[in-house]
Amino acid sequence: ATTLAVTSPQRVLGVSGARRVIVGEETQCALLAAGAAACWGGTSLHAFGGATPDGALVTFSATPLPLQTAWPVADLSVGANHLCARSAEGAVRCWGANGGGQLGIGTLADRRAHPLSADAVTAGATEVVAGARISCAAFGGRRRVACWGSLDMIGLSREVAVVPQEVPGTEGWRGLSLTARVLCAVSGAGVGCFGENRFGQLGRATSMTGPEPAGDVVDLRVADGPVAAGTTHACAVDLFGAVRCWGEDTALGDGAGFARSAPTYARDLP
């Protein structure tokens, strides 16, 4: 309940029974029991749809506010200035800033009010992730990943997609991880990535630096992940429980001091 900086872990006030925490750039949320959720932090674009008890929207909140939805929330993802949620039935709804089409609602208009009556972007989703001016979802069965918003952010297109567009080469992808410039996921027994590759963060063992289409990270086998994409690097837990990373040198943890375009082992983990 303060905006003062802290240097040690502090309990979040008013949140109990949390089953998952979602961390964004300025906004954090927690999934609670029975499909409820609470969020706190920056709300300058009303990205989390929080409202005070009298219904007034606030600029920021140092204490958690309930997410105002008329439907149980199964999953949440916080982007740079928007938020997407998935219901247990697989309906995806997004709200917040929409200058890049990242809400997927067919227009570039912001949806600044709380998401009580927000229409579904798509149905049948098993996962949803929100990034910077872009959002993506994975679908069950053998369907692919679909993305909407500023598709140029991850090298898909120069166009803005105000409705979801399926991404070639992502059949069967699961465990999505989306950042400003890269999307990675578990792909079969390996990891797939696409987007910016300036630091080798796609793990293709190539010096190509421009955006690349969906493809597999070389020399990497995983069970169910997890995989975590950063802006200039990515990491995954391999089949034997080891942490493998690739991309920008300072983020790899291998002590080598130079970028890697293929997975390397993080060292000295506890």
Image: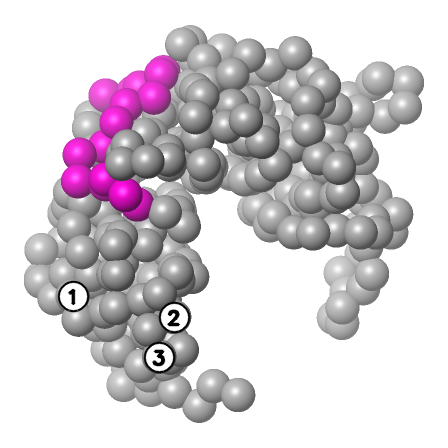
Pinpoint residue 264: horizontal percent, then vertical percent: 26, 78
Pinpoint residue 125: horizontal percent, then vertical percent: 44, 30
Outermost residue toward the left? 207
Count of picture labels = 3
Which disc, if any, is residue 218? 1
Residue plotted at (83% across, 51% down): 16
Residue plotted at (45% across, 21% down): 123
Is residue 149 located in the magenta-colored stretch of the structure? no
**For the residue marked with disc 3, what is the amino acid?**
Phe
Q: Is residue 96 above or below residue 179?
A: above
Is 235 or 139 nearer to us in this picture? 139
Q: CA distance from mark 2 to mark 3?
A: 8 Å
Q: Is residue 270 above or below residue 232?
A: below
Residue plotted at (27% across, 52% down): 187
Pinpoint residue 36: horizontal percent, then vertical percent: 74, 35
The residue beneath circle 3 is 240
Q: Is residue 134 visible?
A: yes
Q: CA distance from mark 3 to mark 1?
A: 16 Å
Q: Which residues are magenta?
A: 159-173
Q: Is residue 203 left or right of residue 176?
A: left
Q: Is residue 87 left or right of residue 19?
A: left
Residue plotted at (18% across, 45% down): 214
Q: Is residue 200 visible?
A: no
Which disc, if any, is residue 237? 2
Mark 3 residue crowding within 10 angstroms, few (<14) / some (14–19) / many (20+): few
Chosen colour scheme: one colour
**For the residue marked with disc 1, what is the amino acid?**
Val
Which disc, if any, is residue 168? none
Mark 2 residue crowding within 10 angstroms, few (<14) / some (14–19) / many (20+): many
Q: Is residue 231 left or right of residue 80?
A: left
